Image (cartoon, helix red, strand yellow):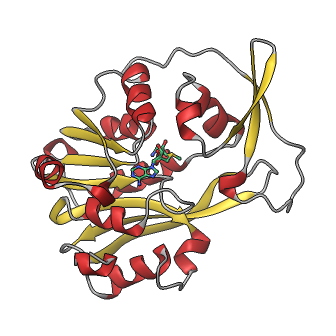
Amino acid sequence: METLDTQRFELYLPARTVGDGLDQDEEWCELKIEGERQRIRLHDYAAIYNVPGLYEQLFSELLDCNSPEVVCDLLGAELEDAAVDPGTMRALDFGSGNGMVGELLDELGFDSLVGLDLLPEARNAASRDRPGLYDDYHVLDLSEMDRHERAELNGHDFDAMVCVAALGFGDIPPIAFAEAFNLVDSPGWIAFNIRERFVEDTDPGGFGAFIKRMFDEGILEERARVSYTHRVSVAGEPLEYVALVATKRRDVPLEWTGR
Ligand SMILES: C[S@@+](CC[C@H](N)C(=O)[O-])C[C@H]1O[C@@H](n2cnc3c(N)ncnc32)[C@H](O)[C@@H]1O
């Protein structure tokens, strides 16, 4: 894979006030383009992907995000421990963005990689910045998938699904996570991360309760879990996450999701 060749940007974060009340999906920064400062919300991924290298500089460098490495390293260690060769496996990178996770999965040696994201800007950025990385890249809302799209995705015969930095905060809802999960054969490999406070949340409609039920009912079997700092907030506070690698034992019944 060629190194991404990008320009450097002048980025400004708001005055760092710890506890200023901005939640993760409300944070913003300013980017200087042609002498003018433009405000961009950190969760406006479409706008960020449209600027080559901005996602990497903002999240990995300025805000110390290391989730792609943490989740992919954990998955790689578990595959090695189980003596499973990724070179025989087909992986779905769910919420794949511009391909930062895909690049690490490629280094682990997966036989085939498929990206899936809600945003056409994500697919455009992946093919612009990491051409040839994905064997296929779908732009799709899995909660509204029609039967042709389902058949096409099932045709990939996934044995692994990886989902990094894309659960909660109005990103991937439980129903779409369940649909992606059900595209993976059983037994299969699932690796994802999620904010620690969502795992602890017992709200019946939330991710915490959903994942707990998957574990309680034996649909998911935990293999490895680490707590770590996903990144710092714009105010410099650590955002605590959990990375998980688990074995999929069977499909999630779709009636759980109201279908
Ligand atoms: C923070 S980015 C993470 C990208 C990549 N996984 C990484 O770690 O660099 C979150 C991604 O999830 C995608 N996303 C949000 N909701 C989604 C949904 N319902 N279905 C698929 N992708 C979604 C966003 O478009 C965005 O590209």
Residue nearest the viewer, comparing 14 with 132: 14
Q: Is residue 80 visible?
A: no
Q: Is residue 189 left or right of residue 44?
A: left
Q: Quadrant of the N terminus?
A: top left
Position of 217 relative to 15 (above/below): below
Q: Is residue 97 left or right of residue 58?
A: left
Q: Looking at the picture, how far across and down is residue 203, in whole percent?
A: 53, 84
The residue located at (31%, 78%) in the rendering is: 258
Position of 166 relative to 206 (above/below): above
Q: Looking at the picture, how far across and down is residue 125, in whole percent?
A: 44, 27
Q: Quadrant of the C terminus?
A: bottom left
The residue located at (40%, 45%) in the rendering is: 118
Q: How many marks?
A: 0
Residue nearest the viewer, comparing 217 with 136: 136
Q: Looking at the picture, how far across and down is residue 86, in whole percent?
A: 21, 46
Q: Is residue 111 visible?
A: yes
